[in-house]
Image (cartoon, grey):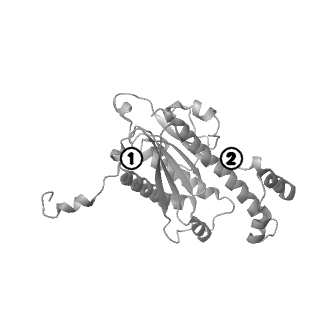
Amino acid sequence: MANSKYAYVRNFELPDPLLPGCFLVCRLDGHAFHRFSDEHGFTKPNDERALELMEHAAKDLMSEYNDIVLAFGESDEFSFLLRKSTHLYNRRHAKILTTVTSYFTSCYVFHWPEYFPGKPLRYPPSFDGRIVQYPDEQAIRDYFAWRQADTHINNLYNTVFWALIQQGGKTTAEAHATLTGTVSSQKNEMLFQRFKINYNETSARFRKGSVVVREVATQDATDANPMPPQPPAVQAETSRPSPKARKGDKTKMAIQVLHCDVIGDEFWKARPHLLAG
């Protein structure tokens, strides 16, 4: 077939290699998830079941692809960091993006009944994705700091917004008007003075987002944020050993979900392997 008269059509396929020596970040976003969350009755301002489902899909994806070393999620988005030395699919942009996006979406749908029992999907959810190339470690740190700062800003706004509606009796238009022009300190004061909510005591999952990371497995290691029972392949990376592991390195990496700070130095200094290349 390769030498058939029709083979010339392959000449229209353009190569799409990603730059060598760059970190790759693949960010997935739920497509039209405002409607999706309304149709499926998500709790406002945060639905813990939905966030745990996103975490589960992210862990499945990292279990499937060993070159994904770190992920960060908030709301209906997740960002995945691939090591800069990755040769996954020969660094073909379209191949990586479409496979990562479709696999994550499939895992989301597959695990839906575990987190929303008795609530069948009304229509298929979908995610869109993009890959951004970053040249160095500082750019990667700044990227994840940006996403975590965005998590805090959005969550603080949404927490006050829904408190004004659910407890304050405001309409959505009135709630938006009340918050227009306010800064973080004013939102925090509004939450505490009007609704006796201390924002810093709300769930770290909501305030800081979800950090999914490969950690060196220890005999007594446990997930800092337990999730529902999962297949062993999701809890520990065994299905696709790294090249070093295939050469005799017996070190095992466990995939953990954390809700911690990634803006400061502590997280990165404790995990130099994430940016080692």
The answer to which of 111 and 90 lies nearer the viewer is 90
Q: Residue at x 16, y 64 (%)?
A: 6
For the residue carrying disc 1, how many other residues have a C-alpha within 10 Å: few (<14), some (14-19), or many (20+)?
A: some
Q: Mark 1: which amino acid? A: Leu
Q: Residue at x 64, y 59 (%)?
A: 47
Find residue 30 and report its horizontal and vertical position in percent.
53, 61
Instruction: For residue 203, say whether it is visible.
Output: yes
- Say how many tags the image has: 2
Instruction: Identify residue for label 1.
Output: 18
Please indicate whether residue 3 sits to the left or right of residue 72 in the image: left
Please indicate whether residue 109 sits to the left or right of residue 245 in the image: right
Instruction: For residue 196, say whether it is visible.
Output: no
Tell me the element at label 1.
loop
Please indicate whether residue 200 sits to the left or right of residue 235 in the image: right
Q: Quadrant of residue 99?
A: bottom left
Q: Which mark is residue 5?
A: none
Find residue 208 and report its horizontal and vertical position in percent.
66, 47
Find residue 234 and report its horizontal and vertical position in percent.
47, 46
The answer to which of 96 and 44 lies nearer the viewer is 96
Tell me the element at label 2.
helix
Instruction: Identify residue for label 2.
Output: 204
The answer to which of 236 and 245 lies nearer the viewer is 245
Find residue 220 and report its horizontal and vertical position in percent.
56, 32
Q: Residue at x 50, y 47 (%)?
A: 80
Nearest to viewer (mark 1 / mark 2): 1
Q: Mark 2: which amino acid? A: Ala
